[in-house]
Amino acid sequence: MYDSCSGSAELIGNTLREYCLITIKNSEEEFQAEMNSRQYDLVLLGIDDVKGPRMQLLEAVQKKSPYTPVVITSANEKAELVVKAMNTGACDFLVHPVSRERITMAVERAIELRNQRHEIDYLRHRQDVVYDFKEVIANSVRMKAVLKTLKKFAGTDSTILITGDTGTGKSFLSGTVHFNSPRKKKPFVKINCANIPEDLLESELFGHEKGAFTSADKQRIGRFEQASGGTIFLDEIGEISLGLQSKLLRVLEEKSFERVGGNKTIYADIRIIAATNKDLVRQVEEGKFREDLYYRINVLPVALPPLRSRQECIMPLALRLLNRYCKSVSRVIRGFSDEAREAILGYDWPGNIRQLANTIERAVILEEEDHIQVGNLALPPRRNNQTQPGTLATVEKRRSSDRLRSDQDASLAGHEKELILRALEECLWVQKSAANKLGISPRALNYKIKKWGITHPHWRRNK
């Protein structure tokens, strides 16, 4: 603290010593030396003149330590001085004589403000790291092309439509676009249109006035207002009713709307990113989606490939997810066993990245060894020869090598089951001994036993 009024300095010092350590300096030189040598949580600075050296001292403190809150104390309460001090960076202004309660309140508010700024900066930094194009795993040619396109789109304000199967990362990539756009310091608001009942979705998007309906006991701000200046992500836009689609079209065209039950026009500068796993062209043909709205949201289209079409990305994604979930449960798991890697790469992942994440999270919780074993993945039977829902792919479009191998796979599968049965019989159905005979781990054998539905009346789980 640096205050030329000894009486106020003594009062402030006595008040604050009950709560914290305080240092009092009586000259500019001592004050500057102290600021250069130590970091303080709060600075109290006495200023009585708009153009005096103390105001320059405030400017110096702000430049040197911009996150340190400064409270001004003064015997001068002229508006010019107060405005100048606050515009220079002070967070509060105390006029002598000041009470102990006012001093305590000012200090508490200043510390709270500092903590809030730290938290906001931390969250922004974290978001910038998470939503970074460089952090997106894109080893396949198709995914590299998608990222290249999204980088270009991020620099614009045009509406983006992201299509793709469930779980392909539409929500994450929409955030990546926002936090790499000129709007990154403004709100990013996400809403899943499929998770909210139709009668509540309008209020969720546009807000409502008090008394608009039975349970509307107060005014509510909608998501479009919350996102003003930033970006709103409308997930599953294909689920919106035709009536609501017309109101959404107006928002896209005029950037304006009214709250439910209100007549005041509200303007919101927003960028819209929409996503869907539906075929909107077909919905337009069937009369389920407005044609004019489709063309309005399809300004910058992006189609995300399913995970099965990104074979080069699967294991890097699996390892990234493994590290994330290991940190969350304080576990050390170094990777995947060979059998687990084969199972991961051989599976079609109809739920895409979301299914992969859930599978690995469960495996991390169950695993007792230092590598994920195939049994803990608990993958359902392979779907390589089935058409995946939500896509236009057919069996005829799958790789010819898969078709040629189908008969061989069936015969090899039968041979594997026969081999396991023979080993179990020779080892009197003791799984550990049979595993040693086959040269695989007991866990891997247990997985194959479950896979082929092999049972024995002496096994505990079959009793």
Image (cartoon, rainbow, N blue to C red):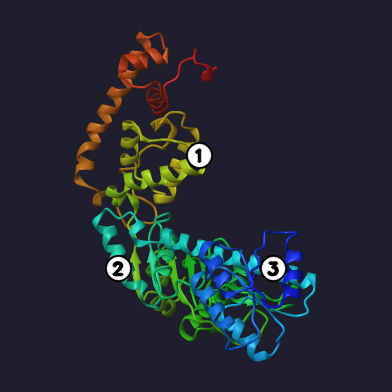
Residue pictured at 61% horizontal, 83% vertical: 85
Q: Position of residue 191 (x, y in %)?
A: 53, 66
Q: Is residue 277 visible?
A: no
Q: Is residue 127 left or right of residue 8?
A: left
Residue pictured at 27% horizontal, 53% vertical: 139
Q: Is residue 254 left or right of residue 76?
A: left
Q: Which of the two residues, 174 or 178, is positioned nearer the viewer here?
A: 178
Q: Position of residue 38 (x, y in %)?
A: 54, 61
Q: Position of residue 385 (x, y in %)?
A: 30, 43
Q: Which of the two residues, 30 or 149, is positioned nearer the viewer here?
A: 30
Which label lies toward us, 3 or 1? 3
Which label lies toward us, 2 or 3? 3
As measured in the structure, the alpha-carbon distance from the residue carrying label 2 to the one carrying label 1 is: 37 Å
Give the mark nearer the N terminus: 2 vs 3.
3
Residue pictured at 27% horizontal, 60% vertical: 144
Which label lies toward us, 2 or 1? 1
Q: Is residue 454 above or below residue 157?
A: above
The crowding category of the residue bearing disc 1, from other C-alpha atoms within 10 Å (few below 14, some 14 to 19, many at least 20), is few
Q: Is residue 156 visible?
A: yes
Would you name the residue on which mark 1 appears? Answer: 330
Query: The N terminus is located in which quarter?
Result: bottom right
Type of the residue with mark 1: Ser
Q: Is residue 30 above or below residue 455?
A: below
- Secondary structure under tag 2 reads helix
Q: Are marks 2 and 1 in contact (CB under 8 Å)?
A: no
Q: State the mark number for residue 149.
A: 2
- Secondary structure under tag 1 reads loop
Type of the residue with mark 2: Thr
Give the mark nearer the N terminus: 3 vs 1.
3
Would you name the residue on which mark 3 appears? Answer: 107
Q: Position of residue 113 (x, y in %)?
A: 62, 68
